Image (tube, rainbow, N blue to C red):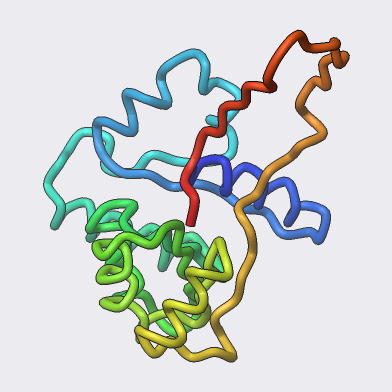
Amino acid sequence: GTYSVYRELRRGLIRHGIVLHWLSLGPDSQAVIENPKWLEEREFGTVLAPHTNDERLQARILHDYLEDAGYEAVFVNVLADRVQTNIARYLGAQIRRIMIVHNITPGTYAAARAIRDYVHATVAVSPRIRNDLVNRLHFPGQTTYVIANAFDGTRLERPARQPGDGALRLLSLGRIE
């Protein structure tokens, strides 16, 4: 999901001297990051507005934080939530905005279209998404790219093959787009 893309993107960008942090908003995010399984991740990000679900207040806090913290660019994940998606509309020109579109649902495409004119570039996680964005939703082709979902296959164990005694049974988890 979105977190996997962030994690692999962070690993890839650090090799180029680019530091990537995560930001999240509200009490739900605060509760997640307090879970011990997220301990290692805490150093790489910040939960803003951890004590309020008020979207206007969250938006103000997020905007001020991004403007004051010296970030040069932000990745906007379409449909992260209303505040985080729409922050692209309100940031100053000094902050580059890159939208990431993760799936082909009508709601995702509507949200992407709504902020299309407020981002500097768009990343589609599949050729199908890029084609839809450029050909159907009129995204500019020269700033709409395909970067496939991040996946580190080296972290998987490769079990020894054993002779079967019948049909091969497989299970695929995920979407086919």
Identify the residue at image location x=36%, y=81%: 116
Residue 139: image quadrant is bottom left
Residue 17: image quadrant is bottom right
Where residue 114 appears, as percent x and y from the top left, is: 26, 77
Q: Is residue 109 above or below residue 19?
A: below
Identify the residue at image location x=38%, y=62%: 104
Left or right: 169, with 57 as reference point? right
Left or right: 111, with 122 as reference point? left
Identify the residue at image location x=22%, y=51%: 58
Q: Is residue 56 above or below residue 40?
A: below
Identify the residue at image location x=47%, y=73%: 97
Where residue 158 appears, as percent x and y from the top left, is: 83, 21
| 149 vs 57, nearest the viewer | 149
| 122 vs 24, nearest the viewer | 122
Where residue 122 appears, as percent x and y from the top left, is: 50, 75
Q: Is residue 133 above or below residue 30?
A: below
Left or right: 21, with 67 as reference point? right
Where residue 160 appears, as percent x and y from the top left, is: 87, 14
